Image (cartoon, helix red, strand yellow):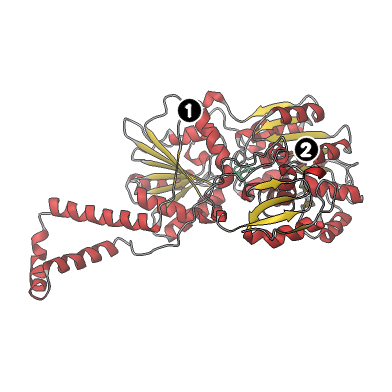
Amino acid sequence: MNATDEAMSFADLALRPELLRALGDLGYEEPTPIQREAIPPLLEGRDLLGQAATGTGKTAAFALPVLQRLAEGEPESGPVALILVPTRELAVQVSEAMHRYGKDIGARVLPIYGGQPIGRQLRALERGVDVVVATPGRALDHIGRGTLALSGLRMVVLDEADEMLDMGFADDIETILQDTPEDRQTVLFSATMPPRIDGMARRHLSEPVRIKIEHERAATGESPRVRQSAYIVTRSHKPAALGRVLDVEAPTAAIVFCRTRDEVDSLTETLNGRGYRAEALHGGMGQEQRDRVMGRLRTGTADLLVATDVAARGLDIEQLTHVINYDVPSAPESYVHRIGRVGRAGREGVAITLAEPREHRMLKTIERVTRSRIEIEKVPTIADLRARRLELTRAALQESLLEDDDLDRFRVVVETLADEFDVMEVALAAVKLAHESTGAAADEEEIPEVALSPTRGRRDGAGRDAGPRERGRGPSRGGMARLFVGAGRSARIRPQDLVGAIAGETRVSGRDIGAIEIADRFSLVEIPESAVQEVIDALRRTTIKGRKVTIRRDRDAP
Ligand code: AMP
């Protein structure tokens, strides 16, 4: 394998063996750039201000040092680390990641968010926890009740700080931080660095190390002739979307990049199960095995290589036409590296990225850093796919008509059938058989189009009334309902307070919330119809700006 200068393993990062083992078991082969840069100073106890979006591996960048600190410290009765996140979804995700990384350390990690019965959280807190991952509102609630002790905290992490501010959690965060020990270690991650985040960092971080995961040096003006596009799909639709894209693109040879060994193995299996000829390549394989795989690709026995970055380093595959990123790469450099494998020697190459909605920002960063454009395309529909498959059959028949001088031996078949049927009908039946023999019959379920709201997370910061806004083309656009909230301008309610309360306490994310209107004594807020009961229940249990308020479905709604 041809390692680059930058190659560095997790073992070089001075992490404990229990953590290294967990990472190995998860199939992580090497640290991502943010992990390489953030983990060493965090292990030294420095504060850190990191600009990194979802998809960069930022969760492990702070989770591993938290776990290491936990393993090396004295046992404490209260939590040692508090991680504040903007949404319930992220609280669960971060806790799950910590469980996975910390399984051999025995870390007790508890997510705390609104919408979950408080009793269960109280019991778990009473039993003792090491790490609390919480949305600010619910954390404050527990602090107020005296059920979440902050005095033993050694680390505080603010994850997706810009999102938390956008959701109106600024005051809550300030209140929480004031009650934490002075000598705690503080980490702040944010995808963007507006002045408000800078201010927060100045107030609460002490001589932080600053990390930005956007290295301008990755800019490659000489990007080869590569057509770059991306499809936005949810995780569960990725295998189907990949199949669809492969069918439409029909690559001669393609490399599909995954993040981990496990992903490589399972995707290879899925693809082979769907009738593609895929081979896995990852760092866990011996040289002989690797050579065999490469041989199959060169001779055309296989046409898809599913690989991790580490395994693919230094590979030069001449017939490669497509590079497919099954996930958005963790850094722009990695993207540049990957797509550099096609479009060589004057041929046009194709680079395709499958991105989850939450990774959209990372795509933008890559575009900016590489100074190239990545077209967001619609996942081909079943109709597109059928049309494309028919086109392939037509092209194959045309080729046969033009080049095959051996067609005459089938003449007798056509002639005998022509006695009984119209020649056109005979041709139609023959095309049908030829078409079906390509395995083109299986139709799949439609893959839903995912909405991306350009106004995601951006609220009316000045607290003015926000009128109806144009939102994404999402599936939720149709079924919206309007809620009446019995507090308005005279109670100093701002749009972000409502968004914060809803997104913090329920599964509804900020982007699913529609128009918000604030009147003097009440407010109206649009949410997806499917979430009405959940939002009403959650908001009745909680407070907005410290007050209990009336919540009900707005009767005047159309
Ligand atoms: P995050 O940016 O923290 O949301 O992480 C994005 C994804 O990358 C998650 O699915 C992680 O499990 C995965 N991941 C994080 N670090 C690594 C790594 N070093 N190697 C492979 N996958 C990783």
Q: Amino acid at mark 2?
A: Ala
Q: Label 2's element?
A: helix
Is 70 left or right of 557, judged from the image as shown?
A: right
Does 220 appear above or below 304?
above
* Between discs 1 and 2, the one toward the N terminus: 2
Give the residue drawn at x 50%, y 32%. 367
Query: Of the residues shown, which amino acid type is indicated by label 1?
Result: Arg
- Of 212 and 408, the residue lying toward us: 212
The residue under the point 39% across, 63% down is: 443
Q: Quadrant of residue 243?
A: bottom left
Image x and y of residue 384, in percent: 36, 54
- Mark 1, mark 2: which one is toward the viewer? 2
- Check disc 1 and report the residue beneath it: 371
Assess disc 2: are there few (<14), some (14-19) or many (≥20) residues with their C-alpha within 10 Å of its C-alpha.
some
- Quadrant for the C terminus in the image: bottom right
Q: How many marks?
A: 2
| Element on which disc 1 rests | loop
Residue at 21%, 63% (x, y): give it: 431
- The correct choice, above or below, for 21 with respect to 531 in the image is above
Inspect this view and state whether residue 520 appears.
Answer: yes
- Given residues 180 and 346, the one toward you in this image is 180
Residue 30 percent location from the top left of the image: 60, 39
Q: Position of residue 454 (x, y in %)?
A: 56, 40
Tell me the crowding category of disc 1: few under 14, some 14 to 19, or many 20 or more residues within 10 angstroms, Cα based.
Answer: some
Q: In the image, what residue occupies the spot 39% across and 55% down?
A: 276
Image quadrant, ligand 1? top right
Where residue 278 sits: x, y (%)?
42, 52
Mark 2 lies on residue: 170
